[in-house]
Amino acid sequence: MSLITKRLATIRQQLPAQVRLIAVTKQVSVEAMREAYDAGVRDFGESKVQEAQAKVAQLGELPDLNWHYIGHLQANKAKKALELFQWIHTCDSLKLAQRLNRLAIELSLQPQVCLQVKVVPDPNKFGWAIPELLPDLAELNQCDALKIQGLMTILPSGLSEPESLAVFERTRELAQKIREQSWSNLQMQELSMGMSEDYPLAVQAGATMVRLGRIIFGERTKGEGRVP
Ligand SMILES: *Cc1c(COP(=O)(O)O)cnc(C)c1O
């Protein structure tokens, strides 16, 4: 059994069956991705549009793959991202949501989208602070080419375990609060949270999708362990 297969088996034992494992494959070779595929992975996460474009082309023959975009999306890459990815986890502003919506209509696509939130103020990260998100909900609800499925968050670095758990729990509570407002187009069933170092806490707090890179594929060579 390969190392990747073993690691995946260990992780799966710890994940509740309903939690979707997204294998984060930035800087990971397509050979390693094939191994992960053979071990049952069907969801790949990438944070660079160009890198993903090459991999989608190389792995195009594999059936039922889902591609998840998890990087900061620049406006000029939005169209390409929609063409490549079924999921955009990192919709981080109303402006980007509206652009994605316009492009999705043009391209006749219905992408699945998460809204990226910052529960704790963090100038180094993108996304809505909670008080900024609530006033944007009415306009987000009108982006009806987008399937707005839930929230995504990335922990700030340097938090203790209880602090990390609290951030994940507040993210879940925010999704719940939005659900209670009964917007027609904001489903809020999904919580994309948890990375290699913190996913058990995220799962404890109700994550429905975890984004795992290094714990499956090993350390990345060019750094970028945590992204802005
Ligand atoms: C790189 C990345 C991950 C995976 O991080 P690991 O520490 O390798 O598990 C998850 N989410 C986002 C947004 C990332 O950029």
Image (spheres, helix red, strand yellow):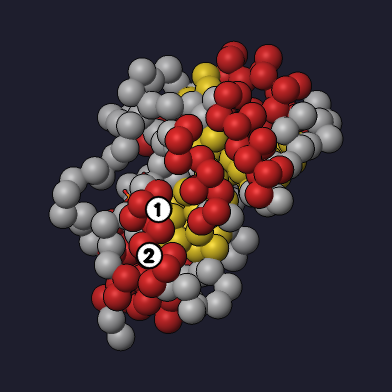
Left or right, 118 with respect to 160, comes to: right
Q: Which residue lies furthest to the left in this view?
A: 221
Residue named by callout 1? 46
Seen at 58% across and 24% down, the residue is: 95
Where residue 216 appears, as percent x and y from the top left, is: 32, 64
Quadrant that contains the N terminus = bottom left
Q: Could you tell me the amino acid type at mark 2?
A: Lys
Q: Residue furthest bottom?
A: 1
Left or right, 143 with respect to 224, comes to: right
Residues under numbered marks 1 and 2 in contact, where contact means CB atoms less than 8 Å apart = yes
| Mark 2 surroundings within 10 Å by alpha-carbon count, few (fewer than 14), some (14 through 19), many (20 or more) | some
Where residue 7 appears, as percent x and y from the top left, is: 33, 70
Where residue 172 appears, as percent x and y from the top left, is: 61, 35
Position of residue 66 relative to residue 164, above or below, is below
Check residue 214 in the rendering and tell me which mark sits there, or answer none: none
Marker count (numbered): 2
Q: Could you tell me the amino acid type at mark 1?
A: Glu
Residue named by callout 2? 55
Element type at mark 2: helix
Element type at mark 1: strand
